[in-house]
Amino acid sequence: MSQYRIAVATADGVKVDQHFGSASRFDIYRIDDGIPVIEKTVDLGSSEGCSGDHSGAEERLAIVEECQYVIAARIGSKIQRYFEIQKKKYFEMSGYDTQYVISKIAEYRSRTGKER
């Protein structure tokens, strides 16, 4: 059985519309054998917009620690480098439908043999 997690920065659970560094909410999906199930929603309160100071980075990084994929409208270069070191895949997908993005990742994994 193949299982992995995807973190999505989303204000409403429908669209990818939050910058990683200032996201007010993350939906964490667990994918079991290609089937997505929302595992939890982490609400961080209101978002003031990304100031670039990364003051909330540690908290956000802890939220996505067990995720193999991180999806956000924007991810700053320092966080991108951190994800690369951690071997996390990240995607900037501003405005995309959350379910569409998750289905494309599942499709990619099955096509590349990562589901086995």
Image (spheres, rainbow, N blue to C red):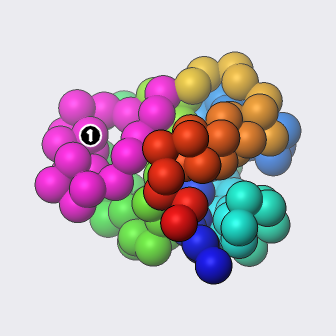
- Residue 26 lies, in percent from the top left, at 63, 56
- Residue 104 lies, in percent from the top left, at 66, 35
Residue appearing at x 80%, y 41% in the figure: 99
Residue appearing at x 56%, y 61% in the figure: 115
Q: What's drawn in magenta, residue-wise? A: 75-92
Judge whether residue 99 is colored magenta: no
Judge whether residue 86 is colored magenta: yes
Quadrant of the image occupied by residue 42: bottom right
> Which residue is denoted by mark 1 in the rendering?
80
The answer to whether 73 appears left or right of 27 in the picture is left
Residue appearing at x 54%, y 48% in the figure: 109
Residue 34 versus residue 66 in the image, above or below: above
Secondary structure, mark 1, is: helix
In the rendered structure, which amino acid carries the disc numbered 1? Answer: Gln
The answer to whether 65 appears left or right of 106 in the picture is left
- Residue 7 lies, in percent from the top left, at 57, 55
The answer to whether 72 appears left or right of 84 in the picture is right
The one of 27 and 116 positioned closer to us in this rendering: 116
Q: Quadrant of the N terminus?
A: bottom right
Quadrant of the image occupied by residue 36: bottom right
Residue appearing at x 40%, y 70% in the figure: 65
